[in-house]
Image: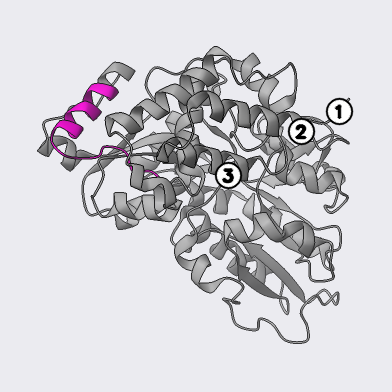
Amino acid sequence: MSTARRRVVATAAAVLGGTLLLASCGGSDSGSSDGKTLRLWHYEAPDSAMGVAWNEAIKEFERTHPGVRVEFEEKGFEQIQKTAPMVLNSGDAPDLMEYNKGNATAGLLSRQGLLTDLTAEVTKRGWDKKISAGVRTTSQYDTNGVMGSGNWYGVPNYAEYTMVFYNKDLFEKHGVEEPTTFDELTAAMDTFVDKGVTPLANAGAEYIAHQYLYQLALSKADRSWVDSYELYKGRTDFRDAAWTYGAETFADWVKKGYISEKSSSLKAEDAGVSFIQGKFPILFSGSWWYGRFKAENKFEWGTFLWPGSNMTLGSGGNLWVVPKGAKNKELAYDFIDITMSEKIQNLLGNKGAVPVAADASAITDPQAKALIDDFNTLAGRDGLAFYPDWPVPGFYDVLVAETQKLINGSAKPGEYLDALQEAYDKGVPKT
């Protein structure tokens, strides 16, 4: 969450920031290497599937490690995104941390020597046997920090992808059927606009806006296009047919009223809450919202894959990384192992996440089964296209700023694409 993620943690994390959430936090033992403390950072909301599962993993860890305590600090996604290089290069690094995957994030830190090479541990503990090829892409990085090959610097224990969330009650109220094609989707949005309803919840100040645009581009793209963009397996031309279609269509959607011009300054949390409050009939975003919507939505809702596209945003989930300067690495490895256990994986699945090593027969919730089935459909057709901010360091901020200009009309699609080209070309590793 996307990549830019860009995750559903703003409610708790933005307020709590660096607050320690469990007992026995802080104090003189912080950073201790006595083997009695595991310092853990992650940015999943407490009521999300991952937040519930990681909390259970903490309990399991403390049960199986008598005398060892967990110091858990909940951080915001943006907070970790911006400060990780500085923190990991200091004496205040945690033992284990959730971090965003991709060349611009985990890849960059691996290249800078700030992460522990986990390859031997991955083999020893059999994590590589539990993680499919498509999911492990974001776990391995070469010497240039490019994902897909090389050593393991992170371990994902869930997967994620984007989908269309829709409010069935609003659809019924306005006489709109669930769309099964792209033309039906745009026709549905026209109907909502005609009735004075802005169809799409959006957030220009964070990842949601540029993920809409990337999805539009993906509807005209294929795997080689994605590999050129994300893995540098060819030249990326932002004036090609796919990127041009994405930018022009997105700008057109703003003009048509599918997307509000006022959404330029909104954050992902604003978009998610507005959907929860029933203010918008549609939100295109990731499976990381699923558990929260299941807990908080007071209306009938459903999901479907973006129509008319074989590809959508998605990948293995965020990574557990072990900072190079971690004081208690063995404890960190043990905690990762617990999150990869069948017990925690099954819990993830039943709470609305996409586990990587669950027992399929143990997933009993019908909505959760549908979520996992759609992911398997995408994976089966090689339809996971990663996230648009991944290719080069700093590209997330560029995408946010430039997409805001499309929303408020201060830039034309061509100017937008040229700005992306310039920033991308500066960041691509020179070979």
Range drawn in magenta: 185-202
Q: Nearer the viewer, residue 229 or 13?
A: 229
Q: Mark 3 against mark 2, which lies toward the viewer?
A: 2
> Residue 164: x percent and y percent?
36, 34
Residue on which the image places disc 1: 430
Q: Say if 334 sits above or below 3 in the image.
A: below
For mark 1, give the secondary structure.
loop
Front-lying residue, 231 or 56: 231
Q: CA distance from mark 3 to mark 2?
A: 19 Å
What residue type is disc 1 on?
Answer: Lys
Q: Nearer the viewer, mark 1 or mark 3?
A: 1
Locate residue 140, reporting x and y percent.
77, 37
Disc 1 versus disc 2: nearer the observer: 2
Q: Secondary structure beneath disc 3?
A: loop
Can you tell which mark lies on residue 426? 2
Residue 4 disc label: 3
Q: How many marks?
A: 3
Question: Are circles 1 and 2 on residues that touch, CB within 8 Å?
Answer: no
